[in-house]
Image: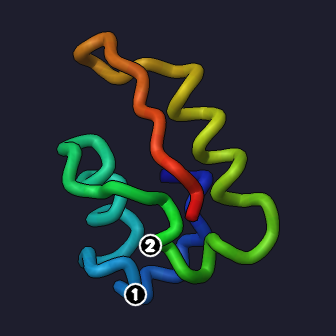
């Protein structure tokens, strides 16, 4: 969650950055591009790389597009 912009705007359709993070982990997010503030700059690219290289508790890496 630290890699998200922490704006907590809800533009992604989830209740803040924590909600978006939970949505990613629960498989409810199909693109990181839902995070509008994070779409500026390289923040979502960094998040994508982190998710790909750090499998979750189930041992599965998450690979979501940025756009």
Q: Residue at x 54, y 72 (%)?
A: 6
Q: Secondary structure at mark 1?
A: loop
Q: Which mark is residue 34?
A: 2
Q: On the picture, is 36 further left or further right than 43?
A: left
The alpha-carbon separation of the residues under discs 1 and 2 comes to 7 Å
In the picture, the quarter occupied by the C terminus is bottom right
Quarter-of-image position of residue 57: top left
Residue at the extreme right: 41
Tell me: residue 66, above or below residue 56. Answer: below
Image x and y of residue 39, in percent? 65, 73
For residue 63, side relative to residue 20 (left or right): right
**Residue 48, how many percent across, how many down?**
59, 43
Which of the two residues, 60 or 67, is positioned nearer the viewer here? Answer: 67
Q: Farthest top residue?
A: 59
Q: How far from the left and from the top, in percent, is residue 53?
A: 58, 21
Secondary element at image label 2? helix
**Colour mode of the rendering:** rainbow
Please name whichever residue, 44 or 18, is drawn nearer the observer in this view of the structure.
Answer: 44
Check the image and report above or below for 50 versus 61. below
**Quadrant of residue 10 within the rendered picture:** bottom left
**Residue 62: x %, y % from top left:** 41, 32
Give the side of residue 42 with respect to residue 26, left or right.
Answer: right
> Which residue is identified by label 1?
11
Residue drawn at x 19%, y 44% is 26
| Position of 50 relative to 20 (above/below) | above
Please report whichever mark, 1 or 2, sits nearer to the chain's N-terminal start. 1
Mark carried by residue 2:
none
Residue drawn at point x = 65 percent, y = 35 percent: 49
Mark 1 Cα shell of 10 Å, populated few (<14), some (14-19), many (≥20): some
User: Mark 1 and 2 residues: CB-CB less than 8 Å, in contact?
Assistant: yes
**In this view, the mark in front (1 or 2):** 2
**Left or right: 36 as drawn, with respect to 34:** right
């Amino acid at each position: 969650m630290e890699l998200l912009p922490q704006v907590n705007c809800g533009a992604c359709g989830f209740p803040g950055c924590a909600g978006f993070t939970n949505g990613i982990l629960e498989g409810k997010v199909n693109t990181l591009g839902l995070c509008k503030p994070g779409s500026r700059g390289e923040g979502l690219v960094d998040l994508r790389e982190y998710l790909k290289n750090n499998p979750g508790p189930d041992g599965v890496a998450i690979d979501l597009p940025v756009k």
